[in-house]
Image (cartoon, rainbow, N blue to C red):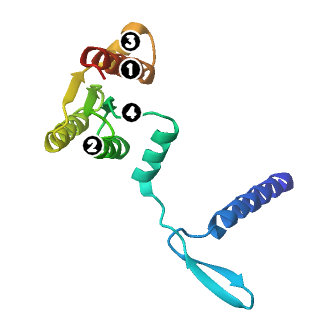
Amino acid sequence: RCEKEKEKRLADSRFSAIVGVIRRRPKPFRQRRRKVGRKVAYRKEAAPAGLAGKAAAFARREALLQPGDRVLAAVSGGADSVALLYWLCAECAAGRVAGVAAAHLHHGLRGEEADRDEAFVRRLCEKRGVPLHIRREDVGARAKEAGEGIEEAGRRLRYAFFDEIARTEGY
């Protein structure tokens, strides 16, 4: 029992040390103090680029997007894929990519919630003027047929759907 308590205290102290380090990091929008002789000078830090800036920097660093590229975005209706679509639309408007389209696979697993996701993606793409490709699959039945798990079958079907669109539509 004592050994377990010691291990727990050690783990807690490591966690609090990590949290302490994280908390001590300077805040990006705040002023940072630095000593200049006897006086303390304040300088403003540059504002971070934000999510769009970070995505653009990553895409440039990894050479993911070229000016003539047409991009197919897999959009589930979740926050991350919607943010990706918005960013790609901005890249397209700025001329950094030639075109953007979206693909949505309805897995047939979550009933009305999945129907709402599909309707949301449809409205979003109509509003932004983005071509949308939708396919409905019964992932549960396909998983049983193939003798694999639902997640694995869903991933396989999604990738096959995206590959098919990319080949046929030239993305």
Circle 3 crowding by C-alpha within 10 Å: few under 14, some 14–19, many from 20: few
**Image quadrant for the C terminus?**
top left
Secondary element under disc 4, as helix, strand or loop, is: loop
Residue visible at 73% across and 60% down in the picture: 12
Disc number for residue 66: 4
Disc number for residue 89: 2
From the viewer's perspective, tell me whether residue 35 is left or right of residue 51: right
Cα–Cα gap, marks 4 and 1: 23 Å
Q: Is residue 75 above or below residue 152?
A: below
Nearer the observer: mark 1 or 3; the answer is 1
> Which quadrant holds residue 31?
bottom right
Amino acid type at mark 4? Gln
Residue 20 picture location, percent across and down:
68, 67
Cα–Cα gap, marks 2 and 1: 22 Å
Residue 101 picture location, percent across and down:
25, 31
Nearer the observer: mark 4 or 1; the answer is 4
Q: Which residue is mark 3?
A: 144
Name the N-terminal-most of marks 4 and 1.
Answer: 4
Secondary element under disc 2, as helix, strand or loop, is: helix
Circle 4 crowding by C-alpha within 10 Å: few under 14, some 14–19, many from 20: some
Q: Nearer the viewer, residue 96 or 77?
A: 96
Residue 116 picture location, percent across and down:
20, 39
Disc number for residue 159: 1
Residue extending furthest toward the right: 3
Secondary element under disc 3, as helix, strand or loop, is: helix
Cα–Cα gap, marks 3 and 4: 41 Å
Name the N-terminal-most of marks 3 and 4.
Answer: 4
Q: Nearer the viewer, residue 163 or 39?
A: 39
